[in-house]
Amino acid sequence: MNENDLFNLDGRRFAMVSSTASRVDPDAPTRFAYTEAGGVVWGSYEGDTVVHGRFVGARRGAEVRLNYVHLTKGSADPVAGSSTNRIELLQDGRIRLVEEFRFEGDDTPQVSVCEEIFTEGL
């Protein structure tokens, strides 16, 4: 299996396990659904404090660069930003995404970690 196959995100689902931007609810974490075709990556996310979110970007090897926008439960104003994700392979065969991100209009660097889950839907 080549690197592109190992790191391909198409059809994979993830749950957030930690974030410097907010406390993660372990019983209802934000969940992410990824689609990938030809290195183009897009998808959606919801849960915890996020009502609905969308992202789009590109993967090159084990790095994914994304732009995102979402609505939170606490505000009607959209939240947007960009991120660089590092794909890590876990010993059990799942993927971990380590995301360095910034919210639009805020230069404070943030980090979140998501791990692959095997469930239907988000």
Image (cartoon, grey):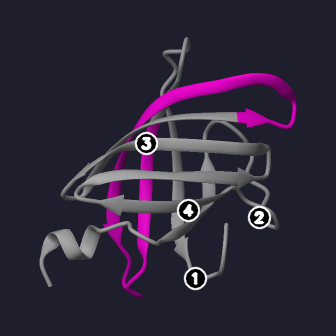
Q: Quick one: label 3, few (<14), some, or many (20+) residues within 10 Å?
A: some
Quadrant of image for the N terminus: bottom left
Which quadrant is the C terminus positioned in? bottom right
Single out the mark in the foreground, 2 or 1.
Answer: 1
Residue depicted at x 79% and y 44%: 49
Q: Is residue 66 left or right of residue 8?
A: right
Q: Counting residues from the N terminus, which is met first, the one under dot 3 or under dot 1?
A: 3
> Residue 80 appears at what percent x and percent y?
58, 26
SS at circle 1 = loop
Q: Relative to residue 15, is residue 41 drawn left or right?
A: left
Q: Which mark is residue 118?
A: 1
Q: Amino acid at mark 2?
A: Pro
Question: Which is the main secondary structure of the residues drawn in magenta?
Answer: strand
Identify the amino acid type marked 4: Ala
Kindly identify the residue that appears in the image at 43 percent across and 58 percent down. 97
The residue labelled by disc 4 is 33
Q: Measured from the top left, where is residue 76 in percent x and y?
A: 83, 24
Labels 4 and 1 touching (C-beta < 8 A)? no
Secondary structure of the residue carrying tag 4 is strand
Q: Secondary structure at mark 2?
A: loop
Q: Label 3 is placed on what type of residue?
A: Val
Whether residue 69 is in magenta: the answer is no
Residue 27, given in percent of the width and then of the height, sits at: 82, 67
Q: Residue furthest left?
A: 2
- Which of pointers 4 and 1 indicates the residue nearer the eye? 4
Q: CA distance from mark 2 to mark 1?
A: 16 Å
- Which mark is drawn over residue 26? 2
Residue of label 3: 56
Q: Earlier in the sequence, mark 2 or mark 3?
A: 2
Which numbered mark, 2 or 4, is in the foreground of this view? 4
Where residue 8 appears, x then y in whole percent? 30, 68
